[in-house]
Image (cartoon, rainbow, N blue to C red):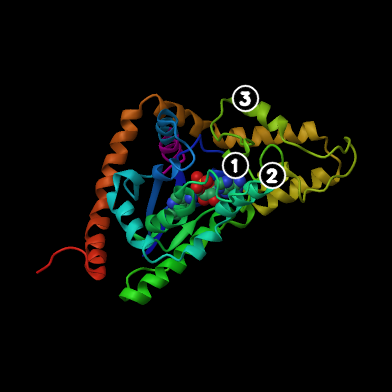
């Protein structure tokens, strides 16, 4: 069987990019006969950017409800919260002792933070950057390796982290003998990078997201706010590079896309295209949204699901960590 594993950081509410890039492909993959899936809430990752406990909790609730509303089947999938599995943070330390600092220096998120400091003329390039941000890829590596994750469905923005996990796994295997499977990113072509309201990558840090389960009226408003070029109705339009088309493509097959390409060539007005996109997405999401709202009103059900998942996950993680500890020389002295 193949181990499929992926997580979402619990900051904010999941958006269309999370859904198309990771949630939907992961749930699809979990349905395959030979798949053994580990899908989780990366709540310790959330502490890196967010120091507001109530927001972290609210977001964990929202991410849990999203996974379940999108059809995750807790009987088939091991569904858990990172912080319920202490083996992950323990492994993270063991991996920290072998991960090269130079490798971490090259992580996109850290480099971007350094770049910001340099651009604002700060003499200290590391000013205000916490160790959590710097070591983030190591915790993510531990998430993956503790369950020997092989296929990792993610958006394109995460592929560098998966490469790093591979690198660290290889180094561990080299030093201590074959232990970890080497993980591989699985990136859905059409959903590589979903653009946000302003055309940049949809991301909580750019404040340009469309929450997946936004109430219908607000959802429609947000779709209407997506930036387009200034071509008039009747003028032929290019679907490539158009955010509306990119979003639509992430949810549809080629024949559906061909129809919309034709609408662009025929000069559809942006207002009409937005209405079309809204109606399409709303149809796709409305039942799930209803289920999401039901779950958000009953967080005890979420806790119950996560408790079962934590047990299943620890049944795998506890003996494996024991093996790892013994390989590195930690534990029993006899
Ligand atoms: P996060 O929480 O930022 O995003 C969750 C998933 O959504 C994908 N994604 C996107 N895909 C397409 N277009 C977008 N605009 C877009 N924005 C986000 C991300 O690529 C990701 O797959 N570090 C991870 C969470 C994590 C993880 C892991 C993932 C922690 N441990 C182990 C896989 C394996 C993160 O912050 O994702």
| 36 is higher (above) or lower (below) than 328 | above
| x, y percent for residue 243 | 72, 43
- Which is in the foreground here, disc 3 or disc 2? 2
Bin the neighbour count of mark 1 within 10 Å (Cα to Cα): few under 14, some 14-19, many 20 and up: many
Residue 67 drawn in magenta: yes
* Quadrant, the N terminus: bottom left
Residue at figure coordinates x 25%, y 70% from the top left: 327
Q: Main secondary structure of the magenta part?
A: helix
What label does residue 203 carry, if any?
Answer: 1
Mark 3: secondary structure: helix
Disc 1 to disc 2: CB gap under 8 Å: yes
Q: CA distance from mark 3 to mark 2?
A: 21 Å
| x, y percent for residue 321 | 26, 60
Q: CA distance from mark 1 to mark 2?
A: 8 Å
Magenta span covers which residues? 62-72
What label does residue 218 carry, if any?
Answer: 3
Q: Camera-side residue: 233 or 195?
A: 195
Confirm if mark 1 falls within 8 A of ligand 1. yes
Say whether residue 31 is visible: no
Residue at figure coordinates x 23%, y 66% from the top left: 323
Instruction: Decide which of tag 3 and tag 1 comes sooner along the chain.
Output: 1
């Amino acid at each position: 069987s193949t181990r499929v594993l992926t997580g979402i950081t619990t900051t904010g509410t999941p958006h269309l990019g999370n859904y198309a890039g990771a949630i939907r492909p992961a749930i699809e993959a979990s349905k395959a006969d030979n798949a053994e899936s580990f899908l989780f809430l990366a709540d310790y990752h959330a502490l890196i950017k967010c120091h507001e406990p109530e927001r972290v909790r609210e977001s964990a609730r929202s991410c849990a409800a999203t996974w379940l509303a999108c059809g995750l089947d807790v009987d088939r999938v091991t569904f858990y919260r990172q912080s319920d599995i202490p083996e992950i943070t323990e492994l993270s330390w063991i991996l920290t002792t072998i991960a090269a600092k130079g490798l971490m220096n090259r992580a996109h998120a850290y480099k971007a933070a350094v770049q910001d400091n340099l651009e604002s003329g700060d003499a200290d390039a590391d000013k205000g950057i916490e160790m959590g941000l710097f070591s983030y890829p190591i915790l993510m590596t531990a998430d993956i390796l503790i369950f020997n994750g092989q296929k990792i469905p993610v958006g394109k923005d995460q592929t560098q982290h998966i490469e790093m996990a591979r690198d660290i796994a290889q180094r561990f295997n080299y030093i201590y003998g074959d232990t970890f499977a080497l993980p591989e990113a699985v990136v859905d072509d059409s959903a590589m990078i979903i653009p946000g309201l302003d055309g940049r990558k949809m991301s909580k840090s750019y404040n340009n997201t469309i929450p997946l389960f936004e109430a219908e009226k607000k959802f429609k408003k947000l779709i209407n706010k997506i930036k387009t070029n200034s071509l008039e109705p009747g003028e032929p339009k290019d679907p490539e590079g158009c955010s509306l088309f990119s979003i639509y493509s992430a949810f549809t097959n080629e024949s559906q896309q061909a129809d919309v390409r034709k609408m662009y060539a025929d000069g559809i007005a942006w207002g009409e295209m937005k209405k079309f996109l809204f109606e399409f997405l709303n149809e796709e999401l409305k039942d799930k949204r209803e289920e999401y709202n039901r779950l958000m009103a009953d967080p005890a059900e979420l806790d119950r699901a996560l408790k079962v998942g934590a047990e299943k996950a620890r049944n795998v993680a506890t003996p494996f960590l024991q093996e790892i500890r013994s390989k590195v020389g930690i534990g029993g002295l006899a």
